[in-house]
Image (cartoon, rainbow, N blue to C red):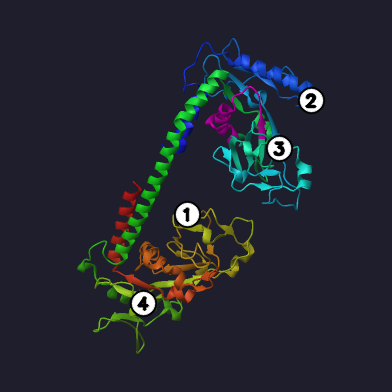
Amino acid sequence: MTGKQLKNSILQWAIQGKLVPQDPNDEPASVLLEKIRQEKERLIKEKKIKRDKNASIIYRGEDNSYYEKFLATGEVKCIDEEIPFEVPKGWEWCRLGNISSVYGGKRIPAGRKLSTSDTGHKYIRVSDMKNSSVLLDNIQYVSEDIYQLIKAYTISKDDLYITVAGTIGSVGEIPEELDNANLTENADKIVFTIIDKRFLMYALQSELVQSQIKECTTKVGQPKLAIMRIQGFLIALPPLNEQKRIVGAIEVVMPSVSKYEQAQIALEKLNTGLNEKIRKSVLQEAIQGKLVPQIAEEGTAQELLEQIKTEKQKLVKEGKLKKSALSDSVIFKGDDNKYYEQVGKQSIDITEEIPFEIPSSWQWVRLEHICSYIQRGKSPKYSPIKQYPVVAQKCNQWTGFTIEKAQFIDPTTIESYTQERFLEDGDLMWNSTGLGTLGRMAIYWEKLNPYKVAVADSHVTVIRPLKSFVIPQYLYSYFSSYTVQSVIEDKADGSTKQKELATNTVKRYLVPFPPLAEQKRIVEKIKEVTSIMRG
């Protein structure tokens, strides 16, 4: 159980009457509700508040069902389906609007800005509302002329706030320092009398009310919680004395809950960090040939490269591969223990490029030598027609490939895409521009795409291994390893604000290449270890 779940459980016990014992000597909530109604009538007569047209009384009939009577019309309806649980004797069900009044805040005029200079007129934003209160360290102000326009929209230290846009459903108190501050239009104030303020706050934070918020949030442009919906929230109301006892009990246990939550967060961070370190270590062992043993009967990477060369020559003859895909580059270790790359008759010392030693049955190769296609996607013309998805950077996450984040190309432009640009099962998609996402990779799987085809945009490099000889998951393991990711920005071109992996850089990436059977064993071993880490 998380700290949040524990807090929710405590609040749920509280509003179900299970946190503290009931006292038969307490004045029942029915009397409290009558006092509130009388107080509201007084305020209406004094024209301090308006009459609520939806004011009602909830009661239990002789048939044991719950009914709601609307005072303005006399209408009565059964609300059994709304009642989530039984409440103790002396408690009552009611609507929030029957025990309080709800008022909106006010936005500042268009084109005007808030100020950090103290004008004497504080303005509370949703961003200031944290941890059931309002933070004081970044409070902003409105000018005198703005204040004159919105001075009716304030909130007092005796009220509660509830956020109604952006972050919806957060409830808290107003510190004394912000008494009568102006209130944002993205929050409402809840005004009440006789009710214990902190009990009402906890009740509104409980799952009983928060679930109602989720159900009734409207979606017009952006989600917004309407005042009439807030007034309609169903509340389980205990006697006033029990409210105070409930608050006392909650505030005794909440510091321990907070400590528990902090300890849990620290433990999760530790576990996450440890798992990440283990994962990186496993990948590093894998790409250095240390994760699984080498088996002589599986052959060598050199033999596999000869098969790849033969296959490429065949594909060129069949017109399925461009002649430029053929290469006579060979990387080898000389008698002087240095690494050389032979291209034609020329040998170049590339020792400085080699990041680590590999088993004798492995071979260092350029990425392009073991792939049939490496190319950036192209800039699409987008369309709302969901027919041909475009894989962009956000589709490629370290958690895997997702088509849900894709946009779509204009169907009329599909003919401008050559066949090779359509993604194939097992293609590697490498984010190649920008900071933050640069170097992030995912594997394209056709089963995750409900559409017929997909293409990549210009920010993604498509890497298509020769899948008869190269396991895509092995390459993915290498390119997600510390060896590659730690220097990805150094390999990229461009300024600090806009880094870019050039296609030629991608093609020329050095890859530690094992025999095919060993690639498979490495992939399976990584799966085994990571599944254990996930539990």
Q: CA distance from mark 3 to mark 2?
A: 18 Å
Q: Quadrant of residue 348?
A: bottom left
Q: Which residues are magenta?
A: 189-214
Mark 4–mark 2 contact, CB under 8 Å? Answer: no
Q: CA distance from mark 1 to mark 3?
A: 51 Å
Earlier in the chain: of badge 1 and badge 3, it is 3
Q: Quadrant of residue 311?
A: bottom left
Residue found 50% across the figure and 62% down from its top: 436
Residue projecting furthest to the left: 296
* Residue ID for mark 4: 353
Residue found 35% across the figure and 53% down from its top: 275
Closer to us: mark 4 or mark 2?
A: 2
Q: Nearer the viewer, residue 98 or 175?
A: 175
Mark 3–mark 2 contact, CB under 8 Å? Answer: no
Please identify the quadrant where the N terminus is shown: top left
* Residue ID for mark 2: 47
* Residue ID for mark 1: 448
Q: Amino acid at mark 4?
A: Glu
Closer to us: mark 4 or mark 1?
A: 4
Residue projecting furthest to the bottom: 345
